[in-house]
Image (spheres, grey):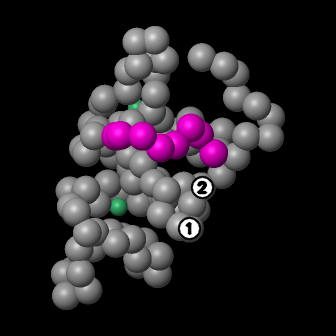
Amino acid sequence: MEEAHPFEVLPPIGGWAPAFVCARVVNDEPYRLCGKPAVWHVMWTANGENGLVCGEHQHEARRRWAFYAIHPYEVTCSVPGAIYYKGANVCRVHDTDWP
Ligand SMILES: [Zn+2]
Ligand SMILES: [Zn+2]
């Protein structure tokens, strides 16, 4: 693992990530994700890059990287077609699904 670059603004993103669990890469060889239960849903960028983090890696995310938004993870976040609504800071499958 390489150290964070001082000008790094985003963690490595992209590739396949499972639902429900933290997708922080904790090992490169062999490639391994954190895998703890996801607690937070991080929107890394305004154009939809996003990822799940556990309670512990939420702290790392807040400390090391600039992100667009963060909200408590719920199963809805992982439903295909779910959309992030910035105003309410939640993910919803469609707009009749409001609490
Ligand atoms: Zn984690
Ligand atoms: Zn979400």
Q: Which residue lies at the image location 80% right of the left edge and 34% below the top edge?
A: 6
Q: Which residue is mark 2?
A: 67
Q: Which mark is residue 68?
A: none
Mark 1 lies on a secondary structure that is loop
Q: Which residue lies at the image location 22% right of the left edge and 63% below the top edge?
A: 80
Res 74 visible: no
Q: At label 1, which amino acid type do we have? A: Ala
Above or below: residue 18 compared with residue 46: above
Q: Quadrant of the N terminus?
A: top right
The quadrant holding residue 90 is: bottom left
In the picture provided, is 96 more to the left or to the right than 11? left
Q: At label 2, which amino acid type do we have? A: Phe
Above or below: residue 93 compared with residue 23: below
Q: Residues within 10 Å of mark 2 (few under 14, many from 20)?
A: some
Mark 1, ligand 2, within 8 Å: the answer is: no
- Where residue 36 sits: x, y (%)? 30, 30
Q: Which residue lies at the image location 46% right of the left edge and 28% below the top edge?
A: 25
- Where residue 41 sits: x, y (%)? 39, 53
Does the magenta portion include 13?
A: yes
Q: Which residue lies at the image location 46% right of the left edge and 17% below the top edge?
A: 27
- Where residue 24 sits: x, y (%)? 45, 33
Q: Which residue is mark 1?
A: 46
Which callout, 1 or 2, points at the residue further toward the start of the chain? 1
Q: CA distance from mark 1 to mark 2?
A: 9 Å
Above or below: residue 82 compared with residue 56: below
Closer to the observer: label 1 or label 2? 1
In the picture provided, is 31 more to the left or to the right than 60? left
Give the dominant element type of the magenta stretch: helix, strand or loop.
loop
In this view, the residue farthest toward the right is 6
- Where residue 31 sits: x, y (%)? 41, 19
Extent of the magenta region = 10-17
